[in-house]
Amino acid sequence: MRRRVLALFAGTLALALVVAGLALWRAGQGTDGLVQAIMLLGFGLTGLLTGLWFLFDQNVARPIETLAGALRTGGVPDQKQSRYLADLGPAARDAALARQRSDQALALALDRHAAEIMREKASLESILADFGAGAVMADARGRVVFYNASAARLLPGLALDRDLGGHLSPGALIAARMRLAAGAQATDLSCLTAQGVRLQGRLRPVEGGLLLILRDRAVERPAPRATLEALRRHAATLVPMLDALDGPIPPALAAAIRAEGQGLAQATRTLSQILATDAPGDTATLAELTAGLTWAEPLLPLVFRAEAAGLNALLLMLDAQVRALGHGPRMAVHPDQPGQMRLALEWAGAPVPIGQLEGWLEEAPDPGQPGLTGAEILARHGTGLWPEAEGATARLVMPLPLAQGHADGAGVTYDFALAARGAASSRLSDLTCVVFDTETTGLEDRDRIVQIAGLRLARGRLTGERFETLVNPGRPIPPASTAIHGITDAMVADAPDLTAALTAFRHFCDDSVLIAHNAPFDMGFLRRAEAETGARFDNRVLDTVLLSAMVWGQSEVHSLDALTERLGIVIPPEARHTAMGDTIATAEAFLRLIPALEAKGITRFEEALTEARRHRRLIEDANR
């Protein structure tokens, strides 16, 4: 490399001497020659120095910048890009490979050491996920650091690092905290959610914050014992009246019988309401409900509001009864009304007569609850069971409500370190962020959003909280745009309009930092819609295009494909140019860029913003 540098400067010197000699020769040709000599000398030396700079920029400066970016992001440098850096390229590659091997060995050791802890953590999460009540933990500032699936169902929109007071009526929460401040170790509260649903709960101080246990408020209804007494009284009154029927019915007796019959009907309706409101608040997966049964198709990841043991025992009993008739039943699930699915036991053959089915339901299917018949299990769930026939297929059908807000496979969501983070931390690794992406009808300002997706990050990790929706743009989607993102007019026909979609997305974002790749494009669509939707996005913004330029320099390509390739992130082909697919890739890229930025001394949002403004000629800053 030293010989190359020497040859480069020696060649430059030789050419400079040639230019100078030509200039001196022209200078001896008189006044005109002197002018030409000066011009020749000036332009010649300028060209030589420009060429020298270009060679250094292409073969030294840019390779060094690329090499530094690869080392800071943990990648292995490409030797082709550093072929003119002599032994520096291979040495950096060897060092990166050695670091990779050390990181892999360290990660393996940590994995082995943490295996037992992870098993205990999984057991604890399983227990908390199945906990029937909604559990929410907040830090001293009232920001959420933990919640389980039941709490997510009771408080729609609940998310980490969001103010708990935004989901409950503030008066009840403030009064409860005042009672705790007065010395109470725990206190009950009755409050309204932001959706107007009344809940009952118990608030207790814990180290560093508060623990709130929530349950659905009990429906005000007559006591079952009083209702049964009313039934007994009406029936006892009707019996002697019926015994007196020996000939034409006197009008007074007919009126009395009619009144008692109406009272009996009303008491029966009241008892039915009680049984319906006693439906269990537990949740059960489709796999739990149908354990031991044969399926006609792969199981769906559905979660129902149901008590698994009783309903599974009932379905197993019905399956055995149908098999005893010589059929081979299989389970299936079909859509019903919104928020509900229909479980069906299906077979080829004749349907079960209703009288025979009612006889089966008089049996107690669950050995653990010998006094509870199949009919009573159905009543407790507020549902029914009936036979149907469709062509050669017979079935027994049972509708069940879905457990709204239950996260698939994620029973609890938490980050207890949020409580210790501090209110004013602006470290990139401490930020609560929403990474998002949009798909649109086109690239012009007049175009409209057709899909939007977001993922929440807290303290440098994905929380599992996500937002995704198609959007009805109110106009046809051009075929050229459909060819890119695959979204058709039929797909968005029943989707929410822009106002509903952006209002919901604004609630999901709250005051989080927004992160996007080419943020001016996506933020432009959000902000141009403010007058129409009323959803104002004044959040702070980070752009992964600018973050990439901070690490690799402006001369590199900073498209999402190029960035993810440099960082070793694979985007499945079917996910590229979908809002959620690009969001996931952008989120992973941001998380991998944080250590590289910190290695360059860019550790806080303000520092990243200052550095981003130095790259304005690459892309504008999306912050207002």
Image (spheres, helix red, strand yellow):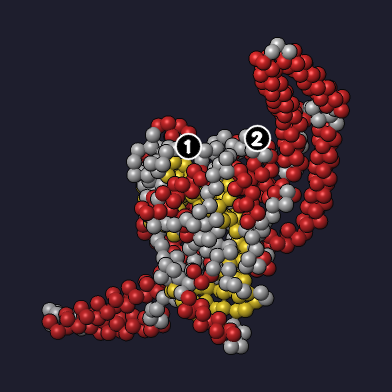
- Say which of 571 and 251 sits in front: 571
Direction right: furthest residue: 3
Secondary structure of the residue carrying tag 1 is helix
Q: Which residue is mark 1?
A: 485
The Cα atoms of the two marked residues, 1 and 2, are separated by 26 Å
Residue at position x 60%, y 79% in the image = 204
Whether 242 is drawn above or below 565: the answer is below
Whether 451 is drawn above or below 17: the answer is below
Q: Position of residue 589 (x, y in %)?
A: 64, 45
Residue at position x 63%, y 66% in the image = 424
- Contact between labelled residues 2 and 1, with CB atoms less than 8 Å apart: no
The kind of residue on which mark 1 rests is His
The quadrant in which residue 78 appears is top right
Query: Dot 1, how many residues are within 10 Å of its Cα: few (below 14), some (14-19), or many (20+)?
Result: some
Residue at position x 80%, y 46% in the image = 103
User: Can the viewer see residue 572 in this picture?
Assistant: no
Q: Which residue is mark 2?
A: 556
Q: Position of residue 345 (x, y in %)?
A: 46, 50
Residue at position x 82%, y 49% in the image = 106
The quadrant in which residue 513 appears is bottom right
Query: Which label's residue is closer to the chain start, 1 or 2?
Result: 1
- 130 sits left or right of 65 in the view: left
In front: label 1 or label 2: 2
Q: Position of residue 433 (x, y in %)?
A: 58, 55
